[in-house]
Amino acid sequence: MSRVEDPVSGQIEAEGQDKSDQEGVTEDKELLVESGSGAEDDISQKSIDFASKFQVLRAAVTRKLGTANIFQTADSLYETLYGDMGPEGIISEYGIANTERYPEAISKLRSIVSFEVEEGVLPDKKSFINVVRDAMTKHVDFEEALVGGAKETIDNLAKIGPIRIWTDGDTIGIPSLGLPGSMEQHKKIAVSGFGVLRRSLARNVPENQGDINRIGNDILAVRASEHKMDMLEGIVDEFAGRGIKTVVVIDDRVDKLSDAINYLKNNSSWLVIPILVKRGEYKTKEGIDQQIVSVDSIADVTDVLSNMHINRDSGVIFLVDFDGVLMDDKVRQYLQNSAAYRELRQKGFVI
């Protein structure tokens, strides 16, 4: 079983601030403008072209590998722009086709975009990849991408029971394929303010009798992996014998909720309460299992639990997804794409 603990001794800590097709976007300009950051006026056509290429490639890499991987996405982008494979080789390698989500995927990759380099010298691939990896994990203020009420809801839930931010994405990479990870999930969570929240929660525990890191980590911690279902066994083991009666699972994907329901019902004695946060492409309730409670936003969860009479005496733990539940994917994509393009320009890799 692949298990990845939090970055520092199981804690949520920031490290330098300087899912599937879910990595997709709707319209290129919407991707770059919709964050509401007022950046529309200085958006260049090159940045839009960069974003569209990058998102098509990230979705293709995620689909092929079964998980996001910034290293491989950056490698594919380099090949598309400068490498021997070129757009046609990448299209063939990843089986990229036009889809409802990406109706112009092929033309976006094939389009001749003038990404010149200074003095006509192609950037070194390794350096190019490292700039993209650092830009997307260390040069983004992820707190800007949190959905309304995200931290407030986690704060409220922590008064009822322990929380595990249970998420999959780019963490340690895929060693069997020689692909390193970028610890993207951990860095997004830490930089967006949940490390600070963890320490605050620990300080406010009345019966605090131990070091702040241990108690804080017990209240709020991250369980992240390339495939988050692999984390469930460890979570069940972690809370065995601790009087847990109920687990509330919060996600924005019906398939993830259904898989979690099946595993937890077969491997624990806990009552499972699944809650679907209807965001983005998962807004409709069509085809949703009747046992799944649906809400429009994470901010609605506290009231739902109150109506169910779930409180700190219920013996409850929370498994809360991150992307799409606590973080707005569109805004995150805007911030990451902008950072990658900006850092590549500063290095002279694109001008």
Image (cartoon, rainbow, N blue to C red):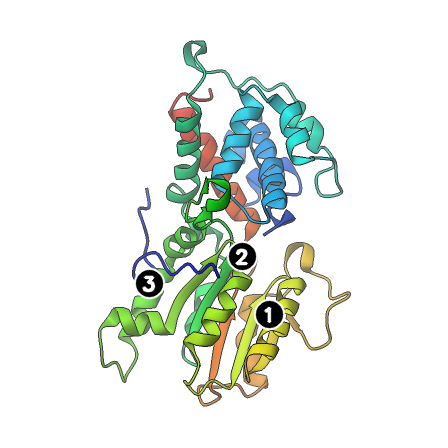
Q: Nearer the viewer, mark 3 or mark 2?
A: 2
Q: Which mark is residue 11?
A: 3
Q: At 37% across and 60% down in the image, what residue appears? A: 6
Q: Amino acid at mark 1?
A: Ala
For disc 2, the neighbor class at 10 Å (few under 14, some 14 to 19, many from 20) is some
Q: Are marks 1 and 2 in contact (CB under 8 Å)?
A: no
Label whose residue precedes the other's in the sequence (3 or 2): 3
The spot of residue 293 in percent (x, y) is 65, 75
Q: Tag 1, which secondary structure?
A: helix
Relative to 228, does residue 232 appear above or below in the rendering? Answer: below
For disc 1, the neighbor class at 10 Å (few under 14, some 14 to 19, many from 20) is many
Residue 129 visible to the viewer: yes
Mark 1 and mark 3: span between their CA atoms? 24 Å
Q: Amino acid at mark 3?
A: Gln
Q: Amino acid at mark 2?
A: His
Q: Are marks 3 and 2 in contact (CB under 8 Å)?
A: no
Residue at the front extreme?
176
Label whose residue precedes the other's in the sequence (1 or 3): 3
Mark 1 and mark 2: span between their CA atoms? 12 Å
Q: At 33% across and 69% down in the image, what residue appears? A: 217
Say which residue label 2 marks: 227
Q: Nearer the viewer, mark 1 or mark 3?
A: 1
Say which residue label 1 marks: 260
Quarter location, residue 128: top left
The spot of residue 29 in percent (x, y) is 61, 36
Q: Tag 3, which secondary structure?
A: loop
